[in-house]
Amino acid sequence: MNPASGPQTVLIEVIDVPSPRIVYLNGAFLPFEEARVPIMDRGFLFADGIYEVSAVLDGKLVDNAAHLARLDRSLAEIGIRNPHTLAEWEKLETELVARNGVSEGLVYMQVTRGVAERDFAFPPADTPPTVMMFTQGKTIVANPLAERGAAIVTVEDIRWKRRDIKSVALLAQVLAKQVAAAAGVAEAWMHEDGLVTEGSSSTAFIVTKERVLVTRPLSTALLPGITRAAVLRLAAEEDLRIEERPFSVAEAKDAAEAFYTSASAFVMPVSTIDGHKVGEGRPGPLTLRLRALYLDIARGG
Ligand code: PDD
């Protein structure tokens, strides 16, 4: 296959890593090579931890307060004490972004239940959580995929029942994303009983032929996407008809438009689902409008 065309090219998503790369671990900014976590960390042993991802645009954090609120909630749901106030988190993130010279990309934050002898139940209450952050430089706005639309595949959702918690236990998503990668596409939408739950790392939306914006309502079945919430606010301001209801894979394939949202993709148009063209097989007008509106507010901070 010509590497300059075809679905394979969507996988070329360049992650910029500065040299030296500075990361944050348990109170210190360190060169990446010096940041070490003990093998008894419960994140490593049990995936006993929570993470968050905020976008960086023009060197500034996007919708960060909402991401930090979700981090706080996820930690509370699994009984890990939040080691920082929201203001402290934001200060640490801002410093990490500056130290790595990130103008566009991501900040990744992770908190695990800390290091303790392997035993399933919680360790002693005074066990300090492990706190880690790193950045990745990434082109989000000028992503060529957004211009032609992302091809996606669908896979069964095999996850646990608390998908509203942003847990680091992402094996099902890793397997879903690998199905997408093997098919040469960027994302996989997961479904349960024929109904789309969400993308492997995104929220799923469709626009019906009657121009209704549809996305699944929040519940324990999916992550409460921060970009989802912003897009729904924008759509309401635009007086779009919105239905928060489950939709099937068949309905998505038959929709006028489809897109997915996340901190790392913003609003990403979908061109095909399992090889079926959605609408004209290119980004739809409503999707492009929402993407443009989202970029405006993301730039506004
Ligand atoms: N993922 N659903 C899932 C399962 C996700 O992992 C994500 C984000 C979203 C979108 O949420 P938000 O709009 O708040 O980014 C929905 C991040 C980007 C990740 O895992 O890298």
Image: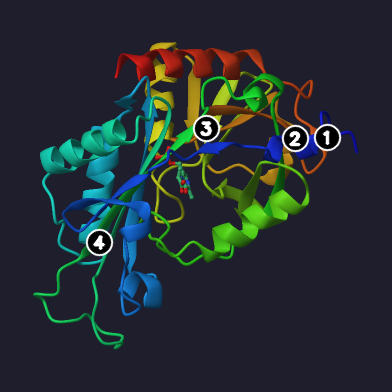
* Three-letter code, disc 2: Thr
Question: Distance between the Cα atoms at labels 1 and 3?
Answer: 23 Å
Query: The N terminus appears in which quarter of the rendering?
Result: top right
Residue 3: % across, % down: 83, 34
Residue 278 lies in what quarter of the image?
Answer: top right
Q: Secondary structure at mark 1?
A: loop
Residue 45 lies in what quarter of the image?
Answer: bottom left
The residue wearing badge 1 is 3
Q: Secondary structure at mark 4?
A: helix
Please say if the residues under marks 1 and 3 sit with CB atoms less than 8 Å apart: no
Name the residue located 82 percent from the left edge and 40 percent from the top edge: 275
Does ligand 1 reach within 8 Å of label 3's beta carbon? Answer: yes
Mark number displayed over residue 77: 4
Name the residue located 28 percent from the left edge and 46 percent from the top edge: 70
Please say if the residues under marks 1 and 2 sit with CB atoms less than 8 Å apart: yes
Please say if the residues under marks 2 and 4 sit with CB atoms less than 8 Å apart: no
Mark number displayed over residue 9: 2
Query: The C terminus appears in which quarter of the rendering?
Result: top left
Residue 200: % across, % down: 56, 50
